Image (cartoon, grey):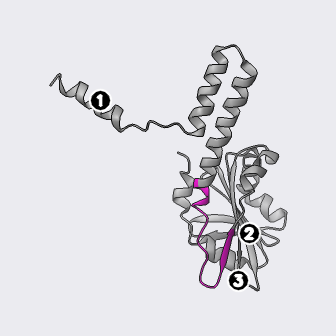
């Protein structure tokens, strides 16, 4: 049995990827700079690695945006990840849906201070009705409906917001989403 362990280790080494990606390059650059005493460059490289990881996460968040229903088209907003920095950080994904005569946008935002700030309001029915909103159920989730916007907090960390004049179309698309999986996003 002692011979099997080295053979297994050798097999694992030969099947492991021998290339580096941008994330590992940035982390290795940061470590090298840190060992050389260049804390500023180490920090820049770690921030770059973090940015790349957040972009990867945002890409996986896009997978939760529903496919367009029959007669509708969907256009992804590729600039969403860059815009998250202006909102205090976090990750996001956004798409615009249209059927030629009506349109709406659907935004997903996670791990953002903005989401945390809205959590108290979204969980307070009295505050929602006092501000002119009402609660609408989509599947098992409760959305706040106000002025053409439907807003919910899924799993206490992912904001889902549909904005547009045709709330029925927004709801129809939202009904196709897997909110249970979205609640576990990134876990």
Q: CA distance from mark 1 to mark 2?
A: 51 Å
Answer whether residue 147 is visible to the viewer in this image.
yes
Foreground: disc 1 or disc 2 = 1
Q: Which residues are magenta?
A: 60-75
Quarter holding residue 6: top left
Q: CA distance from mark 3 to mark 2?
A: 12 Å
Instruction: Name the side, left or right, on which 171 lies relative to 60.
Output: right
SS under mark 2? strand
- Contact? badges 3 and 2 (CB < 8 Å): no
Q: CA distance from mark 3 to mark 1?
A: 56 Å
Quarter holding residue 85: top right
Residue 138 lies, in percent from the top left, at: 61, 70
The foreground one among 160 and 31 is: 31
Q: Which residue is mark 1?
A: 10
Up/down of 4 relative to 177, above or below: above
Residue 72 lies, in percent from the top left, at: 65, 81
The foreground one among 121 and 21 is: 21
Residue 113 lies, in percent from the top left, at: 75, 44
115 is within the stretch colored magenta: no
Point out the tag, 3 or 2, that comes first from the N-terminus: 3
């Amino acid at each position: 049995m002692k011979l099997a362990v080295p053979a297994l280790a050798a097999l694992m080494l030969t099947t492991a990827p021998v290339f580096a990606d941008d994330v590992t390059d940035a982390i290795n650059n940061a470590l090298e700079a840190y060992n050389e005493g260049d804390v500023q460059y180490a920090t820049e490289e770690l921030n770059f690695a973090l940015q790349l990881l957040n972009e990867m996460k945002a890409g996986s968040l896009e997978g939760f945006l529903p496919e367009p229903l029959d007669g509708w088209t969907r256009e992804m907003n590729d600039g969403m990840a860059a815009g998250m920095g202006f909102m205090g950080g976090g990750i996001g994904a956004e798409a615009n849906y249209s059927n030629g005569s009506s349109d709406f946008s659907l935004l997903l935002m996670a791990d953002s201070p903005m989401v945390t700030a809205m959590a108290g309001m979204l969980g307070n029915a009295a505050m929602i009705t006092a501000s002119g909103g009402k609660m609408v159920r989509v599947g098992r989730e409760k959305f706040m409906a106000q002025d053409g916007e439907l807003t919910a907090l899924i799993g206490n960390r992912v904001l889902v917001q549909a904005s547009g004049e045709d709330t029925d179309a927004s709801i129809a698309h939202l009904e196709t989403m897997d909110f249970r999986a979205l609640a576990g996003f990134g876990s």
